[in-house]
Amino acid sequence: MEKARVLVVDDEKEFVDLFVNRFNKRNVLALGAGSGPEALKTLQTEPVDVVVLDLKMPGMDGIETLKEIKKRHPLVEVIMLTGHGSVEAGLQGMGHGAYDFIMKPFNIEDLLVRINKARERKALNEKRQA
């Protein structure tokens, strides 16, 4: 099976660098972006299965970014990252087409399970459209 291709989007550069590094060590091809516009630019040139997207970012927030991703790349799955206790915000993201959400702080193994499930759904949807 090919490696999952993941884009981590968060305005905290240390967070992005940490998770890109951790994902790449766990058989995941990970890229990072520091903002919604940067993520959209990356998606124009890089094949991505799953976007791990922070909800709260300055400028274009996670919900706005999610809407643009789903409009431009409807098969790309998105997992929203929300702060502690932001279940409603996570559910709001799912209402706009996110595959799932996970609250910070989270267990990386739990996130990897969700990433793999999201990737499987993307592959199924691609087969249906072929």
Image (tube, helix red, strand yellow):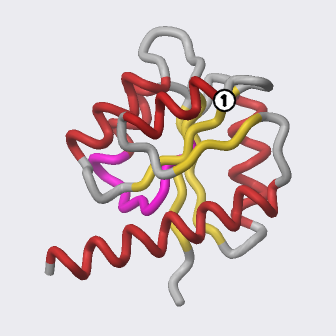
Vertical relation: 45 (above or below) 70: below
Residue at image location 25% in from the left, 51% down from the top: 74
Magenta extent = 43-52
**Quadrant of residue 17 in the image?**
top right
Question: Are there few (<14), some (14-19), or many (20+) residues within 10 Å of tag 1?
Answer: some
Q: Quadrant of the C terminus?
A: bottom left
- Under mark 1, the amino acid is Val
Residue 14, given in percent of the width and then of the height, sits at: 77, 32
Seen from the viewer's position, the closer of residues 17 and 111 is 111
Residue at image location 49% in from the left, 26% down from the top: 62
Residue 32 in view, yes or no: no
Vertical relation: 96 (above or below) 63: below
Residue at image location 68% in from the left, 43% down from the top: 102
User: Does 124 sit left or right of 116 as displayed?
Assistant: left
**Quadrant of residue 76 in the image?**
bottom left
Residue at image location 26% in from the left, 74% down from the top: 126
**Quadrant of residue 123 in the image?**
bottom left
Residue 40, given in percent of the width and then of the height, sits at: 34, 36
Residue on which disc 1 sits: 87
Seen from the viewer's position, the closer of residues 58 and 14 is 58
Seen from the viewer's position, the closer of residues 40 and 52 is 52
Residue 118, given in percent of the width and then of the height, sits at: 50, 64
Vertical relation: 47 (above or below) 58: below
Residue 103 in view, yes or no: yes
Question: What secondary structure is found at the residue carrying circle 1?
Answer: helix
